[in-house]
Image (tube, rainbow, N blue to C red):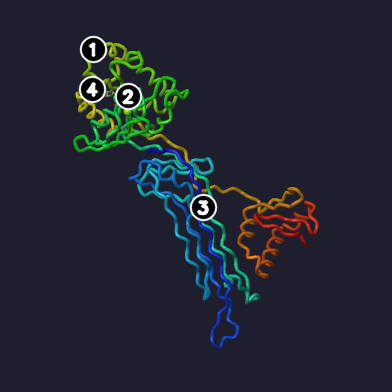
Amino acid sequence: MFIDKVSVSLTAGRGGDGCISFRREKYVPYGGPDGGNGGKGGDIYFEGDPHKATLLDLSYRPKFKSEDGHKGLSSGKFGRYGEDLIIKIPLGTLVFKNGECFADLKTAGERILIVKGGRGGRGNASFKTGKYTAPRIAEKGAPGETAEVNLELRLIADLGFLGLPNAGKSTLLSQISAAKPKIADYPFTTLSPNLGVVNYKGKHFVAADIPGIIEGAHKGRGLGFEFLRHIRRTKVLIHIIDVNGFDGNDPYKNYKIINDELKKYSKYLAKKHIITVLNKIDLPDSQKHIKKFKKHLKTKKLFEISAATRVGVDKLLKEIVKMLEKSIAFNPEEEIKTVPVKKYVYEPEFKVSVEDGVFVAVGAKIETLTEMTKFSEDEALRRYQNILKKMGLEIELEKMGAKPGDTVRIGGFEFTFEK
Ligand SMILES: Nc1nc2c(ncn2[C@@H]2O[C@H](COP(=O)(O)OP(=O)(O)OP(=O)(O)O)[C@@H](O)[C@H]2O)c(=O)[nH]1
Ligand SMILES: [Mg+2]
């Protein structure tokens, strides 16, 4: 099955908790704090894999999580890092994160960080100061980043096939490559793209056969434009036309139908170098049709072939190879705008609002601090309160009308307000 669009949800590993511990040594009555930091949670990456051609396996498993960091240990030992998770995806996959195109993986082995693991919590050794020699305080690990990611595959082939249904696209692919697409005498035999590797006199290139498009495709008729994106990035296109016509139209009318639809889909695609091919010339009456076609279309280079008997196919391949070699100048790769990997957005440390009588404080910094505090430890609690006070939360809450005894919510935690 060919799947070219999926969404997955990613959760990076949580950081390991910091450790509270004190040195115990012979003859040292008050050993100092030696609790190590927790390890960072694992990150999640996507990696371009040239051996993959579909997003099918991701559609079976839409949720991914990388390993959490391990807890810090005594004797100042840091917790082990959580293992990174590397998800392999086909080349040509666009990665949309929170609605924006975030990456376009085009080269084999290219890796991109999608969500970052949480920081490890600090152990009590990190809280030691000159004044404060025996802290009983450690942080919990920070939660890992999460993201909803949409993936859209745009195959990267050198040559793309374009044409009405039943024109003989799949037949041609089966003749020039080892691919074995389904071929039949009715429209829409091909329902998803087929790829084949062509070897023409030692020169290799990848060809993509896509389902046929019909008049009105831009309005969603037939299979619509659904699969045209797979030929957006090809260097050369061939437009295959049944010389005997289709749907009661003569081949020239059909030729124009496809060209018009193409322009409606993408001006960029319509400007690509397109080789026009009349197919099925082995059939009777084809010479008559060719003559008529040539009257309309004088200037363009035209190829006459029979995909079934291979007549004219070698000459066509020669031209394709020639065009591919020149193609950089003709068809520069379509630019896809991706957002810069990192965006710096100013965020206030917190914002307070009132919801049903509860004072709700939101903000990345304040929520992370809350997530990382071990409230079961008195000292951790005291430190937490001090930081919030320094950040100005108490003043802000009072301004908003909070009275002792009121409920304050931060992240998933609720507290009672007191001064
Ligand atoms: N006589 C003759 N028949 C051909 C030739 N090429 C293809 N055909 C026949 O035309 C029919 C359609 O061929 P396909 O290769 O399935 O056409 P397609 O363009 O892939 O069609 P869709 O997948 O439906 O878009 C089949 O019955 C083929 O055997 C040719 O050169 N000569
Ligand atoms: Mg086909």
- From the viewer's perspective, tell me whether residue 62 is left or right of residue 157: right
**Measured Cα–Cα span from mark 3 to mark 1:** 63 Å
- From the viewer's perspective, tell me whether residue 35 is left or right of residue 62: right
- From the viewer's perspective, tell me whether residue 141 is left or right of residue 266: right
Q: Which mark is residue 382?
A: none
CB at disc 4 and ligand 1 closer than 8 Å:
yes
Q: Residue at x 22, y 26 (%)?
A: 313
Q: Quadrant of the C terminus?
A: bottom right
Mark 3 = which residue? Answer: 11
Of the image marks 2 and 4, the number of the one nearer the N terminus: 2
Q: Which mark is residue 285?
A: 1
- Judged by depth in the image, the label closer to the viewer, 4 or 1, is 1
- Secondary structure, mark 1, is loop
Q: Please, what is the three-letter code of the amino acid marked with disc 3? A: Thr
Frontmost residue, 166 versus 362: 166
Image height of 127 relative to 357, above or below: below
Q: Residue at x 69, y 60 (%)?
A: 388
Q: Residue furthest bottom?
A: 27
Check contact, mark 4 vs mark 1: CB within 8 A: no
- Secondary structure, mark 2, is strand
Q: Position of residue 161 (x, y in %)?
A: 32, 28
Mark 2 = which residue? Answer: 239
Of the image marks 3 and 4, the number of the one nearer the N terminus: 3
**Measured Cα–Cα span from mark 4 to mark 1:** 14 Å
Check contact, mark 3 vs mark 4: CB within 8 A: no
Mark 4 = which residue? Answer: 305
Q: Position of residue 108 (x, y in %)?
A: 35, 47
- Secondary structure, mark 3, is strand
